[in-house]
Image: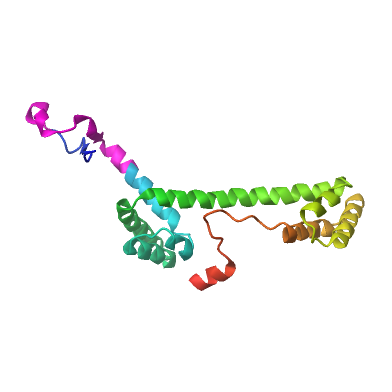
Amino acid sequence: MGMRRIWYHTVFHAPAAAMPAEDFEHQDDIIYVSKSEMKRDMLALQELGEALIPLDKKLLATLNLPEKLYDALIEAKRLTAHGAISRQKQYIGKLIRNVDPAPIRELLDKIAGVSDRHSAWLHRLERLREQLMTDPKALEKLLEECPTMDIQRMRQLVRNAQKEREQTKPPKAFREIFQLLKEYIPEPPIPGLTKVTDTDEQTSE
């Protein structure tokens, strides 16, 4: 398939008679783009580039970005002056026009998925905790899923939390149940995305 030709309305003003049909091998492959459409595309790319600035260096490295763009993103992390940051974002927006945006969007979608899955994981632990408080059989079911769990400790925490609730005391044991659940039901990893640890973040600084 031949290369598609793009004509911008703001540039192409020649009358039809001045452009013989035989000059184009594939008339259907010509794409007419208005100035406003072109501006929207450039703004969208700049916003895409700005979304990369907060990312950890290890995540940026997975994109195999051109060296100039990668260095510009790292430099943007260092800047603090508003004017300098604004100019750097515009520079990143120009550089990213020459990069395939698909892998970038895919990575950002995965990161968004991390947030969604993290929330889902926390909500699941909250539901389990409430089940332990109200359902006598919930502890047995939990033990089937987590056979190495300290069942005696969990049973005692549940009893203490139930007393706290009955006596309207501060929910100390209630909070400890949640922490114990986090120990035995860790957050699931995201396929294709390495979770950045505190150690990684310190190393990358």
Compared with 31, 180 (above or below) is below
- Above or below 87: residue 37: above
Q: Nearer the viewer, residue 188 or 91?
A: 188
The span shown in magenta is: 14-40
Left or right: where does residue 104 sit relative to residue 99? right
From this viewpoint, is residue 95 visible?
yes
Residue 77 vs 50, above or below: the answer is below
Asked if residue 168 can be seen in this view, the reply is no
41 relative position to 6: left or right = right
Query: In this rendering, is residue 113 above or below 82?
Result: above
Which residue occupies 31% across, 38% down?
37
- Residue 31: within the magenta? yes
Q: Position of residue 78 (x, y in %)?
A: 43, 68
Specify whether 95 is left or right of 146. left
In the figure, residue 84 lies in which quadrant? bottom left
Q: Position of residue 7 (x, y in %)?
A: 20, 37
Q: Nearer the viewer, residue 174 or 1?
A: 1
Compared across the picture, whether 52 is left or right of 66 comes to right
Residue 30 magenta-highlighted: yes
Residue in the picture at 67% in, 51% down = 121
Viewer-proximal residue among 111 and 191? 191
